[in-house]
């Protein structure tokens, strides 16, 4: 969602801010802006992409200190006036903000009565006015007083004309400081600063940092705290396209490596605390898995995996729905899956689980993300930065974490366990074979792209894969797509089968095979074209379906990996055929930090 950047140092801030903002584009945004101080404060913003803002900027925009923002509208439409940075009445203060200020209406009314004038519909605009109100020469103190009046979540960067410092603060919204040589940066996300440094301070809730070109001082509740810089292992190349046309395609192609890295990491770390905890305690109770979006589909696959390997009941719930129901007991072990570690609904669910005494293991891809700070245990996935809004390699990495977690303590026959571990090691090669078949999949995608409605069906462990296939297609190609448990098709969607809505059927050679075959025949009887994903060697389905995509032979337990990769490519090439902005689909954000 919204992205924050800031720069202070010896170089001109403008190109650095624009470059950092471009690196944050993947989070999803509808407007952007920068403020640069150098003699006077200049703010330039609009409801445009970063590239277009760059073109609009005046030739002379000099200054070695500045802040920038990409906005994803929540309060007020995407427009020039609502874009950040926002300012005060004097025109000397500029603020960029991520998060939501719940009491902004009251604050705004109060400030208006005190003579402040507002120009935007945003909640953010109260911040510069509060800072102006409290400023008596000390910017840090003024910011601290402003924050004390605010309720809600925030990550902010504050710039004041004439001050050789930036102020950064966070509460329930991520913010990092990139430590450079004679220069420092602020960002809401690590990839923004990778071109300049790999040393990063992760701010914690209620931290207020004063940043100059020479150093960083952090205070929490008025006391100075020591926040040590950490070295990030993600490289600039990791966060760049590396010759691929889109980040999504690059990330799809990285999946064999992601699987290999996960296996390698887990081989050497032996048993993690999280694995132990789950295997020790789970016997008595149930596992509850919570997540949103693609991570939820990984959780749904996880349910089948854990139930088969652990022999315990597993429940999955959407994190966004958990607040309204969802029972827990003293024996509930929770697993929350969140790629970003910042999804507001996932964080809320973790807090509730903890307050009810449930131990929470978080599976995430982002070191020191908010979820890692409030969980009991953390399992890191090995996906590297995922830039494309549509999740691909993070899904596979989540599945790998779940496979490994459950295989380690699996309550199954030893021979079966060994054979699964062996299969798992062969998975990178199998996924590579799917990728090698890219051209064939692209041809099928060109056919899919001609339609406005597509159904995906699967059963058992491949039911969530059908949901994920539909989600991928609708996210990036804007084709209306529905995922269904194959047995449910005749309870409604059949009414829509008219020859114009193709059905993508995922057929694995498991105990659902015969039922899937019957479902395909039912669809064919209603004249809808069927594209089936089948395992190599299967000749039966090809006789019934209109066309097939052949996937390598894997144990059915691992079929959600190879099948999902096919569906990712199908969605990618359908979106490409339709000329869609694949990496940054309209209205979507990579990290959804509002409920
Ligand atoms: C957004 C992203 C999805 C992602 C979902 C959950 O909607 O666009 O790709 O699956 O959030 O994100 P999380 O970071 O919690 O896995």
Image (cartoon, helix red, strand yellow):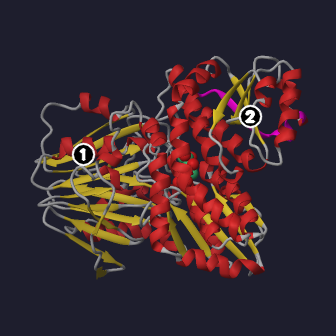
Q: In the drawing, does residue 482 fall left or right of residue 426?
A: right
Q: Mark 1 points at which residue?
A: 17
Which span is picked out in magenta? 478-490
What is the total number of numbered labels drawn onto the structure image?
2
Is the residue marked by circle 2 packed among few (<14), some (14-19), or many (20+) residues within 10 Å?
A: some
Q: Is residue 280 left or right of residue 539?
A: left
Who is closer to the viewer here, 265 or 140? 265
User: In the rendered image of this protein, does residue 114 appear above or below residue 542?
Assistant: below
Give percent across and percent down for residue 184.
20, 59
Residue drawn at x 48%, y 47% is: 256
Task: Say if 306 sits above or below 235 in the image.
Answer: below
Residue 462 picture location, percent across and down: 72, 46
For the point 28% across and 62% down, which residue is it? 177
Marks 2/1: CA distance? Answer: 55 Å
Q: Which numbered circle lies on residue 538? A: 2
* Spot occupied by residue 3 in the image (x, y as percentages of width and height): 38, 49
Quadrant of the rendering where the C terminus is positioned: bottom right
Compared across the picture, whether 495 is left or right of 135 comes to right
Q: Upstream in the sequence, badge 2 or badge 1?
A: 1
Q: Nearer the viewer, residue 593 or 391?
A: 391
Q: Which type of secondary structure does the marked residue at label 2 adopt?
A: loop
Rendered location of residue 328, percent (x, y): 75, 73
Apparent side of residue 89 relative to residue 314 in the rendered image (left or right): left
Looking at the image, which residue is at 13% across and 61% down? 181
């Amino acid at each position: 969602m919204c992205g924050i950047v800031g720069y202070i140092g010896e170089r001109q801030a403008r190109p650095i801010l624009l470059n950092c903002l471009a690196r944050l584009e993947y989070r999803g945004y509808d407007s952007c802006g920068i403020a640069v101080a150098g003699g006077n404060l200049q703010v330039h913003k609009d409801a445009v992409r970063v590239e277009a803002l760059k073109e609009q900027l005046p030739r002379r925009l000099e200054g070695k200190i500045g802040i920038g923002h990409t906005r994803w509208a929540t309060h007020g439409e995407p427009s020039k006036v609502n874009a950040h940075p926002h300012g005060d009445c004097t025109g000397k203060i500029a603020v960029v903000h991520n998060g939501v200020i719940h009491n902004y209406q009251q604050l705004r009314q109060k400030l208006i009565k005190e003579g402040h004038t507002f120009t935007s519909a945003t909640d953010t605009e109260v911040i510069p006015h509060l800072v102006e109100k409290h400023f008596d020469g000390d910017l840090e103190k003024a910011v601290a007083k402003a924050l004390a009046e605010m309720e809600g979540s925030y990550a902010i960067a504050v710039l004041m004309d004439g001050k050789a410092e930036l102020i950064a603060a966070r509460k329930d919204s991520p913010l990092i400081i990139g430590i450079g040589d004679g220069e420092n940066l602020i960002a809401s996300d690590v990839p923004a600063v990778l071109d300049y440094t790999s040393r990063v301070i992760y701010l914690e809730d209620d931290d207020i940092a004063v940043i100059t070109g020479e150093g960083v001082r952090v205070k929490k509740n008025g006391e100075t705290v020591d926040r040590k810089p950490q070295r990030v292992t993600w490289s600039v190349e990791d966060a760049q396209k590396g010759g691929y046309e889109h980040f999504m395609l690059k990330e799809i192609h990285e999946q064999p490596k992601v699987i290999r890295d996960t296996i390698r990491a887990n081989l050497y770390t032996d048993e993690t605390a999280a694995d132990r905890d789950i295997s020790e305690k789970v016997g008595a109770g149930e596992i509850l898995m919570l997540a949103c979006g693609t991570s939820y589909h990984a959780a749904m696959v996880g349910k089948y995996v854990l139930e088969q390997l652990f022999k315990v009941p597993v429940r999955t719930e959407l994190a966004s729905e958990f607040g309204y129901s969802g029972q827990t007991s003293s024996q509930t072990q929770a697993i929350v899956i969140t790629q970003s570690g910042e999804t507001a609904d996932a964080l809320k669910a973790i807090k509730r689980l903890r307050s009810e005494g449930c131990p929470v293991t978080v599976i995430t891809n982002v070191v020191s993300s908010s979820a890692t700070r409030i969980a009991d245990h953390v399992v890191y996935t090995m996906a590297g930065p995922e830039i494309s809004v549509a999740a691909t390699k993070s899904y596979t990495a989540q599945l790998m974490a779940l496979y490994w977690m459950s295989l380690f303590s699996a309550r199954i026959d030893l021979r079966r366990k060994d054979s699964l571990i062996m299969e798992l090691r062969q998975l990178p090669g199998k996924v590579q074979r799917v990728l090698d078949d890219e051209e064939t999949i692209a041809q099928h995608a060109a056919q899919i792209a001609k339609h406005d409605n597509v159904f995906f069906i699967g059963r058992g462990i491949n039911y969530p894969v059908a949901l994920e296939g539909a989600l991928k297609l609708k996210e990036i190609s804007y084709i209306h797509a529905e995922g269904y448990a194959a047995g449910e098709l005749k309870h409604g969607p059949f009414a829509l089968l008219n020859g114009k809505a193709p059905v993508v059927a995922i057929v694995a050679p498991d105990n659902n095979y015969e039922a899937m075959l019957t479902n395909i025949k039912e669809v064919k009887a209603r004249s809808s074209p069927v594209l089936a994903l089948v395992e190599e060697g299967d000749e039966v389905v090809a006789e019934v379906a209109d066309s097939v995509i052949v996937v390598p032979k894997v144990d059915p337990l691992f079929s959600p990996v190879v099948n999902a990769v096919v569906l990712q490519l199908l969605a990618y090439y359908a979106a490409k055929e339709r000329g869609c902005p694949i990496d940054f689909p309209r209205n979507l954000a990579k990290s959804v930090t509002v409920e």
